Amino acid sequence: MTVEVAVAMLIAWAVGKANRVGTQINGLTDETLDLAVNRVRNAVVFKLGDDAAVRRLLEEARATNGSVSSVTQIAAERSIAAAIADDSRFAAELARVTATPTAPGTVSMNNSGNFAGVMGDIHSTGPVNVTSKIVNQAKNHPVLAAFVVVGAVALLGFSADRLMGGATDSLSSPGGAAGNSGGSSSLSVGDESVGSRAIVGTWTASDGTGTKTFNSDGGSCDGFFYSNGEPLDIGGPMTCSISSKPDAEGRYTLVVAQSPNRASYRVEFTDTDHASVFDPSGSKLYELERF
């Protein structure tokens, strides 16, 4: 099944984001599908390079807006299947990037009322009264229930504090939504560390390669490594760091690493929600818009 899903995602990548709106592949749609098709394309191209069958699949998908012939699809499936059989690491990576994600934050319990885990969907072989299950759990484990209640109260208090103070914080932070107030506010290129504060968040790229995330300066990120003008994700953790000061042109240095790959780019912020990314030669790769 992984091979067929991979081919479907390669076709979805080739037709572009605008033409796959509303498409669902292997349970993925919208932003999650955008991210998956980019990762599948990067993994396949990195492994197979200029494989004729894969190249023909992508070219035909672009030319026909996704109406690829069965002959072309089967040829690409054979190439990918052969690569999977030959390389267990590629097989594992392809399985990972084509997998259907489980919904986070739900609780799994069995039909006897015992918690089966903290994450995952609710599974049951018959009708389950969730309210009565929770009450029974509280009766059977009063100490645990007390800790849960205390934690919930603390969380509510923290959330309320954030709601009250969040507006003030966002006004003073380049990345804060409230700082836009009828339009994006300007950034001072002389302000130290403005780059690291402004780039944290989720962005859409003008080159149609899906969303890109920057979690923290020196921390994890996604979608920022490019090779020959195209995004490349070989699997494994990707980290990003950005300079605290801009250069003479007002651009910050962005260093992206995904072992063994490492590259430097330059980022120019025009406001809190818009930036341009340039390759080492100074050519613009793409623009970023805050998601």
Image: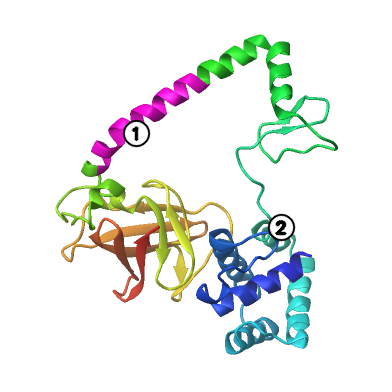
Magenta stretch: give its range.
Answer: 152-170
The image position of residue 16, as x and y in percent, is 53, 76
Q: Nearer the viewer, mark 2 or mark 1?
A: 1
The image position of residue 94, as x and y in percent, is 68, 62
Locate the N terminus by quadrant.
bottom right
Residue at the location (60% across, 62% down)? 29
| Residue under pointer 2 | 92
Of the numbered discs 2 and 1, the one sitting upstream in the chain is: 2
Query: Mark 1 and mark 2 in contact (Cβ < 8 Å)?
Result: no
Q: Nearer the viewer, residue 21 or 250?
A: 21
Specify the farthest residue to the top. Answer: 143
Locate the C terminus by quadrant.
bottom left
Q: What is the spatial separation of the Cα atoms under label 2 and label 1, in whole angstroms?
A: 42 Å
Question: Magenta part mainly helix, strand or loop?
Answer: helix
Residue at the location (66% across, 32% down)? 118
Residue 166, magenta (yes or no): yes
Please give left or right for residue 33 compared with residue 173 in the image.
Answer: right
- Check disc 2 and report its element: helix, strand or loop: helix
The image position of residue 44, as x and y in percent, is 64, 71
| Residue under pointer 1 | 163
Q: Nearer the viewer, residue 222 or 15?
A: 15
Residue at the location (50% across, 74% down)? 18
Amino acid bearing label 2: Ala
Amino acid bearing label 1: Leu
Depicted 95 relative to depicted 65: above or below? above
